Each structure stands twice: as structure tokens, then as C-alpha cells.
Amino acid sequence: MIKALLGVGILSTLISIAIIIFIIVIVILTFLAINNLHRLPKIQDSIENIEKHLRFLAKYERERLIKEGYITQDADSNASPINHYANSGDTWICKKCGDRNLSLSSYCKGCGTYK
């Protein structure tokens, strides 16, 4: 009977230790999460800087495309450069709507019709 009580005692002790370790881990993770909240504004600033840089690169790329003759000055500034490059390489013209598509495309970007 004493051996049985010792077995139960060891089991309950192990369970208690596991619960204490679990609570300690939760407290540490909570501390780390709260401690990193001050970094959110820095992360937001980094994202805004990346967006500004991407807008600058898009403007630069548009100016380069105009300079090299791929697009005109009055071309839609929101248009994707890949559409303008289509005229300089292998393309196919959709039989249904007449849109020019890259040769790699299996369907028309304008109407969705397959080659």
C-alpha cells in the first residue's frame, strides 16, 4: 500500500511540475509579446518606407519605358509594364476580341478565350 501511495504521489508531483512549467511558458510568451508591442510603429514605418521606394521605382520604370519607346507619355500610369513589353516580343492576337497577348499565355487577357 505504501508503494501504491508513492506511485500516486510521484504521478501527482509530475503533473504539478508539468502545470508549473506550462504556466511559466505562458508567462514568458506573454512577456515577450508585450515587450515587442513597442516595435509595431517601427514596423509600420518600415512598411511605409518600402511603399515609398516602390512608388519611386515604378515612376523610374515608367520614365525608362517612355524613354525607350515602349509606351507613350500619355499611357495609363497604372498599366503593367509587362503589357507594353508584349509588343516587342513574340505575341499572339486573340481571334475573338483582337487583344495582343504574350506567346506564353494560353488564354487571352482581355476576354479569357484560349488560344
Image (spheres, grey):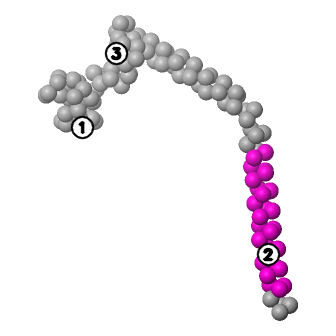
Give the SS element for disc 1.
loop
Q: Residue 51's image quarter?
A: top right
For the point 77% across and 71% down, the residue is 15
Quadrant assignment for the C terminus: top left
Per the image, the residue denoted by label 3 is: 70
| Disc 1 packing (10 Å; few <14; some 14–19; many ≥20) | few
Instruction: Quote the CA–CA distance across marks 3 and 1.
Output: 23 Å
Per the image, the residue denoted by label 1 is: 106
Q: Position of residue 89 (x, y in %)?
A: 28, 26
Q: Is residue 79 above or below residue 42?
A: above
Visible residue check, residue 7: yes
Visible residue check, residue 90: no
Q: Residue furthest bottom?
A: 1
For the point 74% across and 49% down, the residue is 29
**83 with respect to 29 (left or right):** left
Q: Residue furthest top?
A: 74
Q: Is residue 21 magenta-colored?
A: yes
Q: Is residue 113 above or below residue 48?
A: below
Q: Position of residue 68 (x, y in %)?
A: 38, 13
